[in-house]
Image: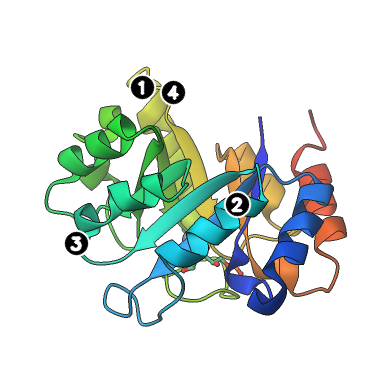
Amino acid sequence: MIQIAPSILSANFARLEAEIRAVEQGGATIIHFDVMDGRFVPNITVGLPVLKSVRKITKLKIDCHLMIVEPNRYAVEFVKAGADMVSVHVEADYHLHRTLTQIRQAGAMAGIAINPATSLASLEEALPFADFVLLMSVNPGFGGQEFIPSSLDKLRRLKRMIDERGLNTKIEIDGGIGKENILKVVEAGAEIIVAGSAVFDGGNPTQAVRELLDTATIWI
Ligand code: DX5
Ligand code: ZN
């Protein structure tokens, strides 16, 4: 099943509840929640208190993408605050197996996030301990960046890597996705599609999610 995960990084935070209602109406099934610490990435966003508030107003799955150093210190806290999915960056965690296991034990889906310039080889040993891989198709830190074209081939290779091992790890893709390239990433193996600016920048998030879903599932 193809799922659209609007990234609230591009939403208007002053009217976050309305923005979430709008994407719910469009058929979004996941809210992508970008956590940045100003150290792992050059930007600071939201954290646990905002997550707790969002948890109270939606039944959609909440997917916390932790772009923070030492994610092991906080990963379980995010599950306790209401996250259904938590991903940590392979570049940021010395003890990925431990963190992934703790996220699962706390009751959420555990994900490994990977930057554009990081080799897929770094996922190999950890893959069986993850429920999903979040493949970055831009350098993390900001919404509205351009899709890095080589991500498409990386996505195909990741899909092959997962299939060859007989795993059913889901692939989430994040960065620079819109109507023009969503079908390509779906064909290449992505099942969860993050979209920030493509959903919120045009002024009609409901319509934008619908169009992305329609475009992504045109051949189904
Ligand atoms: C970037 C974030 C993304 C971002 C996506 O660091 O991880 O989730 O919000 O935004 P768009 O879809 O505008 O590239
Ligand atoms: Zn993200």
Q: Mark 1: which secondary structure?
A: helix
Q: Mark 4: which secondary structure?
A: loop
Q: Residue flagged by tag 1: what amino acid is it? A: Glu
Instruction: Report x, y in % for residue 77.
Output: 32, 51
Instruction: Report x, y in % for residue 182.
Output: 68, 51
In percent of the image, x 77 and y 64: which residue is there? 18
Q: Disc 1 versus disc 2: distance between alpha carbons?
A: 40 Å
Is residue 116 in view from this perspective? Answer: no
- Residue depth check, mark 1 versus mark 3: number of the one nearer the observer: 3
Residue beneath label 4, please?
168
Of residue 171 and residue 51, the one placed in the foreground of this image is 51
- Cβ–Cβ under 8 Å for marks 1 and 3: no
Q: Residue flagged by tag 3: what amino acid is it? A: Glu
Quadrant of the image for the N terminus?
Answer: top right
Q: Disc 2 versus disc 3: distance between alpha carbons?
A: 27 Å
In percent of the image, x 50 and y 49: which residue is there? 63
Which of the labelled discs sits on residue 70, or is there none?
3
Rendered image quadrant of residue 124: top left
Who comes first in sequence, dot 1 or dot 2?
A: 2
- Residue depth check, mark 2 versus mark 3: number of the one nearer the observer: 2
Who comes first in sequence, dot 1 or dot 3?
A: 3
Who comes first in sequence, dot 3 or dot 4?
A: 3
- Residue depth check, mark 4 versus mark 1: number of the one nearer the observer: 4
Instruction: Report x, y in % for residue 80.
Output: 38, 46
Q: Residue flagged by tag 4: what amino acid is it? A: Asn
- Residue depth check, mark 1 versus mark 2: number of the one nearer the observer: 2
Q: Residues within 10 Å of mark 1 (few under 14, many from 20)?
A: few
Q: Mark 3: which secondary structure?
A: loop
Of residue 153 and residue 141, the one placed in the foreground of this image is 141
Which of the labelled discs sits on residue 164, or is there none?
1
Ligand 2 within 8 Å, label 1 CB? no
- Cβ–Cβ under 8 Å for marks 2 and 3: no
